[in-house]
Image: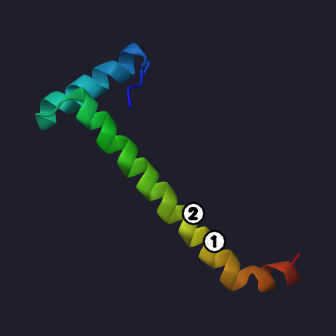
Amino acid sequence: MAMTLRLTDDEDRALTATAQRLGISKQEVARQAIRQFTDERARFEDIVHRAVDRFGPVLDRLK
């Protein structure tokens, strides 16, 4: 799927520098960053859901 990504000048410079340092395209840097963000977010949400499931009754009593 095609997508247009609008970046500030500073963001573009950082993206360009990272891509050059890693020897990969800016597109690949962006794709890896998106995967990392979404994976970390999913893990965080899973931890929160498990904590609420486990400690929800206790938290309700502490209200």
Question: Which residue is disc 1 drawn over?
Answer: 49
Structural distance between the alpha carbons of marks 2 and 1? 6 Å
Residue 18 lies, in percent from the top left, at 22, 32
Asked if 7 appears above or below 32 in the picture, the reply is above
Q: Which residue is mark 2?
A: 45
- In the rendered picture of this protein, how many numbered marks are placed on residues? 2
Name the quadrant of the C terminus.
bottom right
Give the class, few, some or many, for how many residues have Cα within 10 Å of label 2's Cα (few <14, many ≥20).
few
Callout 1 secondary element: helix
Location of residue 11 (image quadrant): top left
Residue at the (63%, 77%) spot, across then down: 51
Residue positioned most to the left: 23
Q: What residue type is disc 2 on?
A: Glu
Residues 2 and 30: in front is 2
Residue 61, image x and y in percent?
87, 84
The image quadrant where one finds the N terminus is top left
User: In x, y percent, where is residue 24?
Assistant: 15, 34
Residue name at image x 57 percent, y 63 percent: 45
Residue at 69% from the left image edge and 76% from the top image edge? 52
Above or below residue 25? Residue 43 is: below
How many residues crowd mark 1 within 10 Å: few (<14), some (14–19), many (20+)? few
Q: Is residue 35 left or right of residue 57?
A: left
Residue closest to the eye, 45 or 2: 2
State whether residue 55 is above or below residue 25: below
Tell whether label 1 touches label 2 (CB within 8 Å): yes
Q: Amino acid at mark 1?
A: His
Q: What mark, if any, has residue 8 been given in the picture?
A: none
Apparent side of residue 53 relative to residue 1 in the rendered image (left or right): right
Q: Residue at image x 45%, y 51%?
A: 38
Q: Secondary structure at mark 2?
A: helix
- Residue 7 drawn at (x, y percent): 42, 19
Which picture quadrant has residue 17?
A: top left
